[in-house]
Amino acid sequence: METKKFDRTKKTLAILLMFCFVLSFTAASVSAADNSKGQSEEGYKDGYDEGYKDGKKQGQKDCEQYGSKEILNKIPTPSNKPSWTKNYKDSYNKGYEAGYLAGYGQGRYGCLK
């Protein structure tokens, strides 16, 4: 009878120990992924600013050439420097796309007013 209690307690403790191990491993990997947040925000802002300038220029040009007809088919791919980290490059590209769309709309709207 006591052997069964001991075995059951041993199993329960083993399961709890495994659960704690998995939980600590998950927490460690999540905290490690958050360390580069500041760099990606900087990349997004830099990309947004550059995309906004390019988009506004292209929106103005398209407005003068095509008038009110929708013409934007493709957002150009920004040039990336090889020295940039992957995280910076990804956030820069996302920021560039968002900035390009905002600038393009602003350029077209300003011309059609």
Image: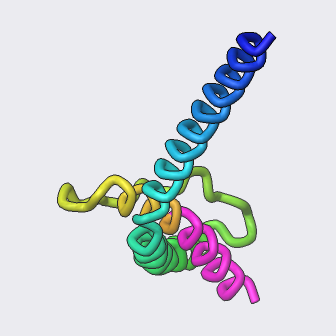
Q: Which residues are magenta?
A: 97-113
Query: Considering depth in this image, is 30 or 61 the residue closer to the camera?
Result: 30
Query: Considering depth in this image, is 24 or 51 the residue closer to the camera?
Result: 24
**48 sits to left or right of 39:** right
Query: How many circles with numbers are drawn on the protein?
Result: 0
Q: Quadrant of residue 71?
A: bottom right
Quadrant holding the N terminus = top right
Quadrant holding the C terminus = bottom right
Q: Position of residue 53 (x, y in %)?
A: 46, 80
The residue that appears at 71% across and 26% down in the rendered structure is 12
The residue that appears at 60% across and 51% down in the rendered structure is 73
The residue that appears at 67% across and 88% down in the rendered structure is 110
Q: Position of residue 61 (x, y in %)?
A: 52, 74
Q: Position of residue 52 (x, y in %)?
A: 51, 77
Q: Main secondary structure of the magenta part?
A: helix
Residue with the most extreme left position: 83
